[in-house]
Image: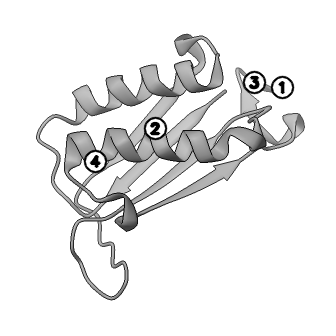
Amino acid sequence: MPLLEITTNTAIDNSQRLAEQASKLTADMLSKPESYVMVKIQPEQTLIFAGTNEPAAHVKLKSLGLPENNTAVFSSKICSLINSELLINSERIYIEFANPERHMWGWHEKTF
């Protein structure tokens, strides 16, 4: 159910490693099995933030039952991962959190 998307204007030397780390982090943060987590990495995208093309990232975390009172903690952990792996400062990262209704999330020919 959880989906973490990381879009950045920087090149990523090892996007597979980043995806694996992001998958584990997402599962840990949400206390959900990693077998349900999907991670999408989009490097080298056109992304302008604050009027410049300096390294930046746009992140989306979507999950059924996303604990909305924990988004500040999630933001910190996601920013730390991106900063350590991609050297992007947290002031250049936007994160969107979404908690869709069950009927708005499909999988395996049905919805949740």
Residue at which label 1 appears:
112
Label 2 to label 1, Cα distance in Å?
27 Å
User: What is the crowding at mark 1: few (fewer than 14 residues within 10 Å), some, or many (at least 20)?
Assistant: few
Along the polypeptide, which appears first: circle 3 or circle 2? 2
Question: Residue 99's spot in the image, x, y percent?
Answer: 77, 43
Question: Residue 98's spot in the image, x, y percent?
Answer: 71, 48
Three-letter code for the amino acid on which mark 2 is drawn: Lys
Of 105 and 79, the residue lying toward us: 79
Label 3 to label 1, Cα distance in Å?
10 Å
Three-letter code for the amino acid on which mark 4 is drawn: Asn
Q: Secondary structure at mark 4?
A: helix
Label 3 to label 4, Cα distance in Å?
37 Å
Question: Residue 27's spot in the image, x, y percent?
Answer: 55, 20
Residue at which label 3 appears:
109
Along the polypeptide, which appears first: circle 2 or circle 4? 2
User: What is the crowding at mark 3: few (fewer than 14 residues within 10 Å), some, or many (at least 20)?
Assistant: few
Three-letter code for the amino acid on which mark 1 is drawn: Phe
Residue at which label 4 appears:
83
